[in-house]
Image: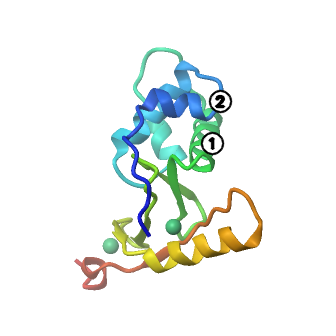
Amino acid sequence: MESDRQPAPTPLADVTLIGRHTQQRTVVVEALIRADGFVGAQALHNRLPAGGSPVGLSTVYRTLTALANAGRADMVRDTNGERLFRYRPGTDHRHYLICTECGLSRPVDSDPVEDWADTIARTSGFANVRHTVELTGVCPDCELGT
Ligand SMILES: [Zn+2]
Ligand SMILES: [Zn+2]
């Protein structure tokens, strides 16, 4: 399956996509992009730049969830059940294998999953069919205990 590749939207476009554009949401989206990996809402909140109008943790949660729902972020859960988010630069969505020990994440080939999901979407009569697939394990470094 060829996926439609589109130019990566700007953070501001993403903020508009998830609703009312606010300075706080912009700050959250920009922080998520800078995080460059999976990060929890609390951790991201800790990284927000000081100064300007303060952004509450609940705003961070809402913005991250809205981004994920809009397809602009990937979401997984760590072993404690905490939701972790990662910015998705384009519409080309990916699946990751995540180390439960250190949080290392690497993209994995997911063509069979995408083909299966596309088939379900085409034949089910459902609109906006989405899927979440999480792969977790222990990376080689953690397995060796280094
Ligand atoms: Zn690891
Ligand atoms: Zn997928």
- Please, is residue 77 above or below residue 140 in the view? above
Q: Name the spot of residue 87 as percent of width and height, x first.
A: 44, 47
| Screen quadrant of the C terminus | bottom left
Mark 1 beta carbon near ligand 2 (under 8 Å):
no
Q: Name the spot of residue 108 as percent of width and height, x first.
A: 37, 73
Mark 2: which amino acid?
Answer: Gly
- Please, is residue 98 above or below residue 15 in the view? below
Q: Identify the residue shown where x is 54% and y is 45%.
A: 41
Circle 2 crowding by C-alpha within 10 Å: few under 14, some 14–19, many from 20:
few
- Identify which residue, 91 or 42, lies in the foreground: 91
- Identify which residue, 82 or 2, lies in the foreground: 2
Q: Which residue is mark 2?
A: 19
Q: Secondary structure at mark 1?
A: helix
| Screen quadrant of the N terminus | bottom left
- Please, is residue 93 above or below residue 137 in the view? above
Mark 1: which amino acid?
Answer: Ala
Q: Name the spot of residue 37 as percent of width and height, x first.
A: 37, 53
Q: Which residue is mark 1?
A: 66
